[in-house]
């Protein structure tokens, strides 16, 4: 066995996403550490030393984002709108919701596992639909995800400069403030030097955006 490690804890200590100690005072706890690893290591298709590792570690440890199976994360797959609101709904504590989605013509197409999350997202006005549809199973784009996070932040003044990106002009008018804010806050840093606003957001890209939002923006 490895040598014991002393950990000073204030508040809540989680190991593998589970609360193992909760206290309101500072205390010293000694654990036998048999091996080291990251939350990303639980999935066979995630690297434990890639650019995305701190972000996948965060969303997995926070139990807001899960894999596409018990053993795979599908890092370069896309994320649907239903999956995105489910992640954010979990991050919000999965509150009770009673909102009626019947005003949307495709409400019946919302998967049962995402129904409460979608109700919450519409109720909180972070999802507004597109031409009367929720498009819950469509892959979410980078500017759509930025817009949803921007709305969650309260739609603050945006001062980020998009002109450094060669495709800045391709940002949709309705997403300009959200993309400006996302660049300003570090939620988006560009992909290969471009914003790629209409491009589908990959799962690892979403993990990064969500991590920065929850850890660095919403926590302030």
Image (spheres, grey):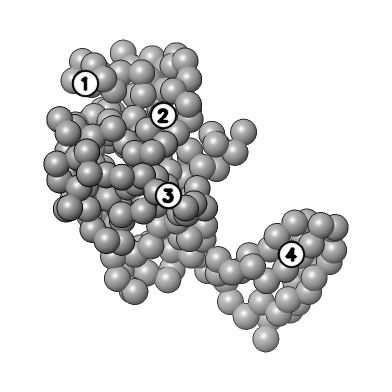
Answer with mark 4 or mark 2, whichever residue precedes in sequence: 4
| Helix, strand or loop under label 3 | loop
- Please report whichever mark, 1 or 2, sits nearer to the chain's N-terminal start: 2
Q: Which mark is residue 22?
A: 4
Rounded to the nearest angstrom, the CA distance separating label 4 from label 3 is: 29 Å
Residue 172: mark in rendering: 1
Crowdedness near tag 2: few (<14), some (14–19) or many (≥20) residues, C-alpha within 10 Å: many
Secondary structure, mark 4, is strand
**Which is nearer the N-term, disc 4 or disc 3?**
4
Q: Residue at x 31, y 54 (%)?
A: 115
Q: Position of residue 24 (x, y in %)?
A: 81, 57
Mark 4 burial class by Cα count in 10 Å: few <14, some 14-19, many 20+: few
On the rendered structure, is 42 left or right of 78? right
**CA separation in Å, label 4 and label 1:** 46 Å
Question: Which residue carries the number 2 mark?
Answer: 150
Label 2 and label 3: CA atoms lie apart by 22 Å
State the image coordinates of residue 49 (x, y, percent, origin top left).
Answer: 44, 57
Q: Residue furthest bottom?
A: 1
Residue in the image at 21% along x and 21% along y: 172
Return the residue at label 3: 97
Q: For residue 191, which quarter of the picture?
A: top left
Q: Is residue 107 above or below residue 186?
A: below
Mark 2 or 3, closer to the camera: 3
| Mark carried by residue 192 | none
How far across and how far down the image is residue 11, in percent? 75, 56
Pointers 3 and 1 in contact (CB under 8 A)?
A: no
CA–CA distance in space, label 1 to label 2: 15 Å
Q: Which quarter of the rendering shows the C terminus?
A: top right
Rounded to the nearest angstrom, the CA distance separating label 3 from label 1 is: 31 Å
Residue 135: image quadrant is top left
- Is 41 situated above or below 150? below
């Amino acid at each position: 066995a490895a040598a014991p490690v002393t950990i000073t804890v204030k508040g809540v200590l989680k190991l593998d996403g589970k609360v193992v100690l909760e206290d309101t005072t500072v205390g010293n706890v000694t654990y036998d550490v048999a091996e080291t690893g990251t939350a990303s290591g639980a999935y066979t298709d995630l690297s434990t030393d890639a650019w995305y590792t701190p972000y996948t570690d965060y969303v997995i440890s926070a139990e807001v984002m899960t894999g596409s199976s018990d053993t795979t994360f599908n890092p370069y797959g896309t994320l649907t709108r239903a999956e995105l609101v489910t992640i954010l709904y979990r991050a919000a504590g999965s509150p009770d919701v009673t909102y009626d989605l019947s005003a949307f013509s495709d409400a019946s197409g919302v998967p049962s596992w995402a129904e409460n999350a979608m109700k919450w997202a519409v109720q909180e006005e972070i999802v507004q639909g597109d031409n009367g549809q929720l498009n819950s199973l469509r892959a979410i784009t980078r500017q759509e995800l930025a817009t949803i996070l921007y709305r969650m932040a309260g739609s603050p003044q945006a001062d980020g400069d998009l002109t450094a990106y060669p495709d800045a002009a391709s940002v949709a008018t309705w997403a300009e403030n959200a993309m400006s804010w996302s660049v300003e806050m570090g939620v988006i840093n560009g992909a290969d030097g471009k914003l790629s606003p209409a491009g589908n957001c990959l799962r690892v890209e979403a993990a990064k955006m969500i991590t920065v939002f929850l850890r660095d923006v919403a926590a302030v």
